[in-house]
Image (cartoon, rainbow, N blue to C red):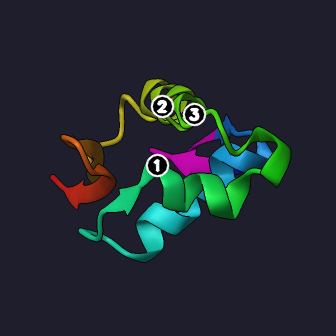
Amino acid sequence: MTATLNGEEIALTTREFSILDRLLSYPKQVFSRAQLMDEFWDSADAGNLRAVDVYITKLRQKLADCMDFDIVTVRGIGYKVVPR
C-alpha cells in the first residue's frame, strides 16, 4: 500500500496504512494502544502493546517530511494526529 507525501509515493505496510487511516479519519481524537491493538492485531498478538509503539515509530519515520500533521504521543493515554 502507498500514501502520497509531497507528490511522492511512500510504501506502507497494510497495518501501517490502516493505523494512519484511523488516526487521520479522527483528527485530534486520542487512540489508546489497546484500541489500536484490538482493531489491527489478532488476539494472539494482543498482549504486546509495545508493538503499537513500533508501528507509530515507523510511521513517524516514513512521514518525517510531512508538513500537514504530526502523530503525537499523549502521555499515558495513546496517540493522535494534530495539524501543524
Give the extent of the magenta segment: 3-9
Pinpoint residue 9: horizontal percent, then vertical percent: 65, 41
Which amino acid type is shown beneath numbered disc 2? Asp
**Left or right position of 67 against 58:** left
Magenta stretch: residue 5 in it? yes
**Residue 17 to residue 13: above or below:** below
* Above or below: residue 41 compared with residue 28: above
Answer few, some or many: residues within 10 Å of disc 2's Cα (few below 14, many 20 plus, some between 14 and 19): some
Residue placed most toward the observer, 83 or 33: 33
Q: Position of residue 68 (x, y in %)?
A: 28, 53
* Circle nearer the N terminus (1, 3): 1
Q: Amino acid at mark 1?
A: Arg
Q: Nearer the viewer, residue 52 or 48?
A: 48
Q: CA distance from mark 3 to mark 2?
A: 5 Å
* Occupied quadrant, residue 58: top right
Tell me the SS state at disc 2.
helix
Disc 3 target residue: 55
In the displayed structure image, the side of residue 42 where residue 59 appears, left or right: left
Location of residue 40 by image quarter: bottom right
**Residue at x-position 25% and y-position 43%:** 72
Helix, strand, or loop for circle 1? Answer: helix
Q: Is residue 26 magenta?
A: no
Which residue corresponds to mark 2?
53
Q: On the image, numbered disc 1 is attached to which residue? A: 33
Look at 44% across and 35% down and name the residue there: 63
